[in-house]
Image (cartoon, coloured by chain):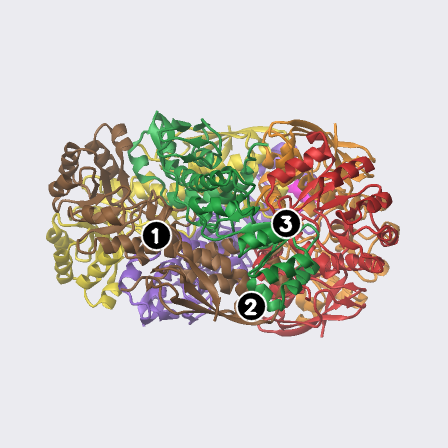
Chain colours: A brown, B green, C yellow, D purple, E orange, F red
Amino acid sequence: MPLAPLPAILIEPIVREALLEDLGRAGDLTTDAIVPLELKTKTVMAAREEGVVAGLDLAALAFRLIDPTIRFQPMIEDGAAVAPGARVAIVEGRARGVLTAERVALNFVGRMSGVASATAKLTAAVSHTKARIVCTRKTTPLLRAIEKYAVRAGGGSNHRFGLDDAVLIKDNHVAVAGSVAEAIRRARAHVGHLVKIEVEVDTLAELEETLGVGVDAVLLDDLKRGVAMIGHRAISEASGRVTSETARGIAETGVDLISVGWLTHSAPTLDLGLDAA
Amino acid sequence: MPLAPLPAILIEPIVREALLEDLGRAGDLTTDAIVPLELKTKTVMAAREEGVVAGLDLAALAFRLIDPTIRFQPMIEDGAAVAPGARVAIVEGRARGVLTAERVALNFVGRMSGVASATAKLTAAVSHTKARIVCTRKTTPLLRAIEKYAVRAGGGSNHRFGLDDAVLIKDNHVAVAGSVAEAIRRARAHVGHLVKIEVEVDTLAELEETLGVGVDAVLLDDLKRGVAMIGHRAISEASGRVTSETARGIAETGVDLISVGWLTHSAPTLDLGLDAA
Amino acid sequence: MPLAPLPAILIEPIVREALLEDLGRAGDLTTDAIVPLELKTKTVMAAREEGVVAGLDLAALAFRLIDPTIRFQPMIEDGAAVAPGARVAIVEGRARGVLTAERVALNFVGRMSGVASATAKLTAAVSHTKARIVCTRKTTPLLRAIEKYAVRAGGGSNHRFGLDDAVLIKDNHVAVAGSVAEAIRRARAHVGHLVKIEVEVDTLAELEETLGVGVDAVLLDDLKRGVAMIGHRAISEASGRVTSETARGIAETGVDLISVGWLTHSAPTLDLGLDAA
Amino acid sequence: MPLAPLPAILIEPIVREALLEDLGRAGDLTTDAIVPLELKTKTVMAAREEGVVAGLDLAALAFRLIDPTIRFQPMIEDGAAVAPGARVAIVEGRARGVLTAERVALNFVGRMSGVASATAKLTAAVSHTKARIVCTRKTTPLLRAIEKYAVRAGGGSNHRFGLDDAVLIKDNHVAVAGSVAEAIRRARAHVGHLVKIEVEVDTLAELEETLGVGVDAVLLDDLKRGVAMIGHRAISEASGRVTSETARGIAETGVDLISVGWLTHSAPTLDLGLDAA
Amino acid sequence: MPLAPLPAILIEPIVREALLEDLGRAGDLTTDAIVPLELKTKTVMAAREEGVVAGLDLAALAFRLIDPTIRFQPMIEDGAAVAPGARVAIVEGRARGVLTAERVALNFVGRMSGVASATAKLTAAVSHTKARIVCTRKTTPLLRAIEKYAVRAGGGSNHRFGLDDAVLIKDNHVAVAGSVAEAIRRARAHVGHLVKIEVEVDTLAELEETLGVGVDAVLLDDLKRGVAMIGHRAISEASGRVTSETARGIAETGVDLISVGWLTHSAPTLDLGLDAA
Amino acid sequence: MPLAPLPAILIEPIVREALLEDLGRAGDLTTDAIVPLELKTKTVMAAREEGVVAGLDLAALAFRLIDPTIRFQPMIEDGAAVAPGARVAIVEGRARGVLTAERVALNFVGRMSGVASATAKLTAAVSHTKARIVCTRKTTPLLRAIEKYAVRAGGGSNHRFGLDDAVLIKDNHVAVAGSVAEAIRRARAHVGHLVKIEVEVDTLAELEETLGVGVDAVLLDDLKRGVAMIGHRAISEASGRVTSETARGIAETGVDLISVGWLTHSAPTLDLGLDAA
């Protein structure tokens, strides 16, 4: 299956809000003052550096919400790798709308492509192993759904989408419960049958206790020995400040997942621009 | 005047939305399962690396919106420089609320402190000149107001907040109008008396034409000769991919402003965490 | 752990919207016309029939949003069984606010207690087995979170909260994929590591194929033989128009879960009223 | 005049919210994983039991908001009686959208048809009299407008839509005012000339006092003697836990209206489903 | 009964939106730049001309939403007549919040007091008759509830609040129905028992037909003869561009209601200001 | 450049909200009862008095949001002067939608045309001078953007849109700062380079101090001597209760701007109506 697009009903409120944020109370003063109402233009959205593109549906929506007659024609699909100068989309229609929506469209594509590009680099670094790159809940406030999508566009996979779709037992929870086993027991009693449970373990003793009780996934500290001890009894996850350089070594331990917070909170945007066609 | 706080009425909808994004439909499964309702906790928000902090009001609000009885006591103010390990705030109250709001609070402070820290570094690099570091409209969608605030917290200044609070004439506008002078004339006829006009000029001829007509600010390409030609007739601005290394040289040309898009779209977050007190 | 309350930030928008729906543009004409502004009252919210109560936080919020000085004092907790006449809460304060918010408060508690009571009856019918009663996505539009909570208050457990927190492969999906095994394979490749997969199987052959590939849960048609075949390899679920009479027999097959759509879409409300104290 | 449809501008926010509630942050995982993007399908929405259908516009909107290219073709109109197996609508288009919107569409039509069907049964039971079946304010929070519409679709009529469109004086109001007459006097002085006044009376003495002052409608306790006493001086209303069995007798007293709370708060949904065409 | 205040839950969204409209993305630049954070102030809201005041709750809310520690102490109540210079309220607290909220608070009180003052003038002009001054649906978009309240504060009464709380049959409706009688018949068949019906009649023949069928109110063209013909059979209403001068004559015809569109769409604001205390 | 239209994305929420305000929970009872669903109509929106029209896009949107098949064909453009009886637009389509949206459409056009007409009158009165008529922040709450647009349609210009797009130093700010010069200094240090600064001065001494420091604009009390003293050093503004009669004299002092609060808060609406075509 190719990458599934985000439902329009989910992204429209975000794009609409972003446009209103930029238009303020008076709209695009510069363009309204200078550009005739019916003047047409044809422009190309192009990459200025190498990377993986994501967010074209949001760009299309930004132009359409400003002027439904503007035609946004993608040249590639989300998830495609681009070289510097690559044409990403053709934008054609009334110049006013194109100029007014340009910045918001680029802000979305730049950020989402930045996340996708960073993910793709890490994914490539571990492609000779079974390890998958996953994102975390360290996302930009209000943009979680589109950043998680961008991670998928870059070939990565998603960890929890929120506090409510899986259990992740951390050290504070263990401390409150008294033991890992008791924490897991409470979680299992509390949640529905379709909710998975993952535990963060700090020591091999804790890991042993965890595996004894049984969980779906384990977030490991001592990676090497942890992975070996787990075997097929749970999904293993490594985390921390992973880079393209360190990812390879981590993946080669045999770990199933490498979670990377900076993919969503600190990946630099991909540079793109709009040029005359 | 110290840094003015953002009005609560402006930031509350953002923090509320971010919490709802994280809580989903079922809330914090893990904490609800494991942590007793009335258990109290005391934790410290601490910096894990050097930087400048911003966003403490948003963190306070995140905890308060989850549980109004939680006490968030800042140890420093937005704009303060911190060393690794520095205590940023004390968070005290029911453990459930503290754990549930923790990630959202940190996501805000991390991102805003990241922007402030990057701004502070550039500001320091040009502090021996009159140049000010300013941000652009290349902000994270939906977060413009708080990112612009973070730039101020880092000692920077703000460019336009949107398309509606100033005129910025770029090359496309000039192309449509036929000449810089005509573009400026149209803008002046269109806008109110409290709206400033800035022009992006590519050549010295264009600059001369611009200064002849008169504008408030000029975004320059050929910086050295441009700054000299302008003198006191307008505010001068430089832009582009400015780093701590290149900022100094740019500032020493005598330019008034250095605008930096990556401050808001690509500054890495500042690492902070919540530790047991 | 006792029943975890719903976060106030989740329920407030619902209660607020319900009050606005009832107040319309002109507010409570009758009460405003007749009841003096400062007249105080003390009333008792009481059950008029046997059942299990849920939704007291929403009732409290309804009164508080209309008049923050009204004191809503619960006599019991959500999940408690009540006899006819049982006092559920004391409501004390300005009579205007009490009368204005009364209907909305009762509408919430009545509906949620109706769901909880129906769940409790089914739960009691299967209490000698390991079977758990679970609800479905056949909930009242806009009220899913509070109806799922009411199911928990009645001693039941929750199935999926939406289309996004677990995979449930039904016959149409199997038809499209060509086989159960292929459908499961596609699902596994698509979703993150914390997403569980459940399959609806119509025949024992399909069940065998499903167990061969491995899934987290199975929704069964031929219950008896299905449960036996599954053993400990997956969670087993029965569904259909289950009543207190039929639930016992279904549970005694050894099935893990009995899902019941009518708990949320057709359970009659529990009758409660507000009486002078 | 046939049943007037609800304005699209009123129902769209409700349907949109219901879809977002089901899609969560990640959308329809199962369908996105398994069903190819362009696969087309043709399905039939069919009744599984006897009843009266309502809510087809909301179903149509659910599909359209997910995918505007889906064609929803109603076979009957709201208010039509159906037998088990009756075809209600054809749904045709991309399979993804059809599967994703199916549950929400059915949740709306099921609930609204449930209300309409219950109303139709009571209406039929009193059709040999002048009595009309009316609903109350005991509606599902946030769904009042569509439930009141469903009552009309079932042949019933609507009582107040909220606290602001008519005066209904109950015993608490009378107690505060000191007498029925004083309560009515205060109400009349307070409200505009287009607001009707109804009074709930417990005794014949109170009824006499009420008729002496004059009101638009009276909610009666002692039905038989009350109706006779009123004559043409006001509209008479009976209420309480009315069933198909008891409605006939009540109607034959000559009362004008029989109000029934459970129509909106406890009518079971009508069972409908989507089948391959 | 004194004037009933508007429920806070109804006015808060309006005041909040008005403040956000004024604060924009950056808040009160002037005050933030100049006024120290903790500086206190004490000011008086005073009338600058004669009139009737309304909207003090909205002013109080404007200050409270900006800074909950500001104390807004009304000196009079809504509906009170004021002379030029009269003190309306004391506003005390941090100067920043007072200055920031001042304009929005005054905009509300000015507009609502303008409506109340105009209403009071007309009401006084007809006080020797039984005629009441009523407003129409020609209100300022988004402000209907508060303008209708202001009319009540000025001693007037309210016509319909919207298209849904009463029937008003105009000439176009009559034209479509074929006759007044048929229009009334259709309306009666369509609406619930608590909905009143008013008809606009152009000729005495139409009036006779209307009274024959029976309605609740009649909007008259030929006032004198119309009022006489109606007697006690319906409420009579006059409309048109009524002024203080013409109102007296109209009222003396014995008409029950005089509806005045300009009260809400064209009444000039009452001049008020904030002065140092 | 002709008047730039307001972006649809800005006005749609306002028009939508206004329609919902009028429809309430039950929609247009009268029209639904009387007018057949498919009956077509053709009507003309016509001016009933002389003035300048504004707001046609909002009227068009009102009809379209109620029924997308209605065709609204403007006969003139916003900003055009009309005589009594002038045809403003043709409205054609299903009669139900036309009747239901009529009032809201007229409320918008009436109010906005009222503002435009008043502005045009003042503008004409000063057309022999360089003075421009500008509006203030004394706008109707929630309608600032469309009222400011209406001022432009009438030939006027806009002052600040809010507290955040320019600095306006008033006497209270000066009092806090200690001197005009200090207030200006603080403002300049606080705001970005694209924010203009205006000062309200009460005395010529203050004006001198202001001009010494340098600002963008000055709001004057002693107009004649002030304008002379300013020369070309700043934009000069007069304010106060300006009428068509007094505007001429004020303008002839040579002042640049005349700001008029009542344009937006007290201009009477322009009378328009919908007639059969």
Residue E19: image quadrant is: top right
Residue C266 seen anywhere in this rendered image of the structure: no
Q: Quadrant of the C terminus of chain D?
A: bottom left
* Residue type, label 2: Ala
Question: Above or below — where is A175 with respect to C148?
Answer: above
Q: Residues within 10 Å of mark 2 (few under 14, many from 20)?
A: many
Question: Above or below — where is E16 with respect to B182?
Answer: above
Marks 1/2 in contact by CB < 8 Å: the verdict is: no
Magenta stretch mostly in which secondary structure? helix
Q: Residues within 10 Å of mark 1 (few under 14, many from 20)?
A: many
**Judging from the image, what secondary structure is the residue with disc 2 in?**
helix
For the point 82% across and 46% down, which residue is it?
F227
Mark 3 lies on residue: B231
Q: Give the alpha-carbon distance from disc 3 to disc 2, as whole Å.
A: 35 Å
* Residue type, label 3: Gly
* Residue type, label 1: Lys
Mark 1 lies on residue: A148
Q: Nearer the viewer, residue C180 or D263?
A: C180
Q: Give the alpha-carbon distance from disc 1 to disc 2, as whole Å.
A: 33 Å
Q: Which residues are magenta?
A: D203-216
Q: Nearer the viewer, mark 3 or mark 2?
A: 3
Measuring from the top left, give residue A224's x and y in whole percent: 14, 41
